[in-house]
Amino acid sequence: MNIKEVSTGNSVEELLKRREKCVGKALSIAHEYPLHIIKGEMQYLHSATGEKYLDLVNNVCHVGHSNPKVVKAGQRQMAVLNTNTRYIYDGLTDYIERLSATLPSSLSVGYLVNSGSEANELAVRIARAHTGARDMIVVEGAYHGHTGLLIDLSPYKFRGPGGKGESEPWVHVVPIPDTYRRKGEDYIEELKMVVNESDAIAGFIVESMLSCAGQVPLPEDYLSSAFKYVREAGGLCIADEVQVGFGRLGTHMWAFEDQGVVPDIVVMGKPIGNGHPMAAVFTTPEISASFEDMEFFSTFGGNPVSCAIGLSVLDVIEEDKLIQNAKEVGNIFINGLLDLMDKHTLIGDVRGRGLFIGFELVKDKETLEPATLEAKEIVKEMQDRNVLLSIDGPHKNVIKIKPPMVVTKQDALETIKLLDEVMLKISTNSH
Ligand code: PMP
């Protein structure tokens, strides 16, 4: 299928005008200026105006936009059977067994749902059912989903625009263990203090590398100490692997493995279905048993089409050695960014692993004053050069790189070259 065949003939202006009337304004639009995209192709997006963009943002289309193997698996299963998990079919058992085999052996029971939010919501329900407690611990700056409960568990939202500012009494927030901005702090002591705020901890929900908080790797031993204190207080430890799972860090399948811990509950989402709406929760048989009094059913979760798609995603990760690719290409990005940091004073920090990278922009390397406007400008200039990036972190000054895992060394080298050019232009303009 070529681009002309998928072109709709609508202009971006027309679509924006119609969209404004029929889509709620709480939904924002990605990138510095809106893109009318008509086709995805592995790590690239094609626009209606004939531009081809390198997508360094989308961590959902993990094995590539419209990966032909995944598309075929979905099409084949759609033409044969799509039913629900109250029936017996090979796909469900095959898929849960296959996913479980990628996890520590204790995490052998899986629940399949349709979004990361649903999965996190279920994880919290399971933790509460098992412990009989209600309170939760979360990390500052975290986002865990869009349901009512998860907004209350997402400081990114309740402390952000439109949020109520204050946390609910059952939510306890630990500071970001950010070794760049908060060097030398005793993160474990801070966590211990937060655990002691409550005598009814149901759980601690945490990403194994922080995403919305600004692409922050956790200090070594952070999770092992945190899990120890949370468990001593009777809580369960939930690893939210929605962004960082499925080999993105280039070392293991799951990011918590980097920290040498085994969570009580693992939540998977985004890349799991390469864009097909799927998510999963895995836990131990003992914890799952506490949740089995009331029937659990999700109409679409774990349907045969989703299972076929999920299986094909796992096949592609293995067959195309994408975890290895994440490591190799990630290193090129990171080393290239470190070289740029030597050259451009605007880059204060480069961090991350594999294809989960952030670089933080500051106006002054002593005061760490955030270079928020410059970050925006760099991302816009890169968009002008057909490379898509995004920004996050509490000061909106961390540029993120988290592309489909099929991105190549050539893509990385080209990106670094363009970033060099853009940063030179920005520093020259500001003098
Ligand atoms: N957890 C994390 C870490 C996320 O980044 C997101 C989505 N950005 C979610 C949960 C929620 O997933 P979904 O949008 O699929 O509901």
Image (cartoon, rainbow, N blue to C red):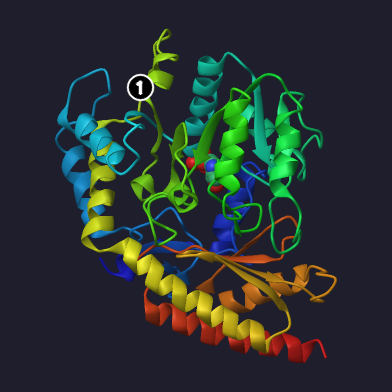
Task: Say whether residue 410 is left or right of residue 211.
Answer: left
133 vs 50: above or below: above
Q: Is residue 351 above or below residue 241?
A: below
Whether residue 289 is visible: yes
Horizontal side of 332 relative to 94 (left or right) equals: right
Q: Nearer the viewer, residue 214 or 17?
A: 214
- Quarter of the figure that contains the C terminus: bottom right
Q: Residue at x 72, y 24 (%)?
A: 170
Residue bearing the label numbered 1: 285
Residue nearest the viewer, comparing 236 with 111: 236
In the rendered image, the quadrant that contains the N terminus is bottom left
- Report the residue at 65% width, 86% height from top: 342
| Residue 288 percent coordinates (x, y) | 40, 20
Q: Identify the residue at the far right of this view.
A: 367
Residue 386 in view: no
Residue 12 lies, in percent from the top left, at 55, 63
- At a point 64% along the width and 51% down the height, the residue shown is 28
Viewer-proximal residue, 428 or 258? Answer: 258
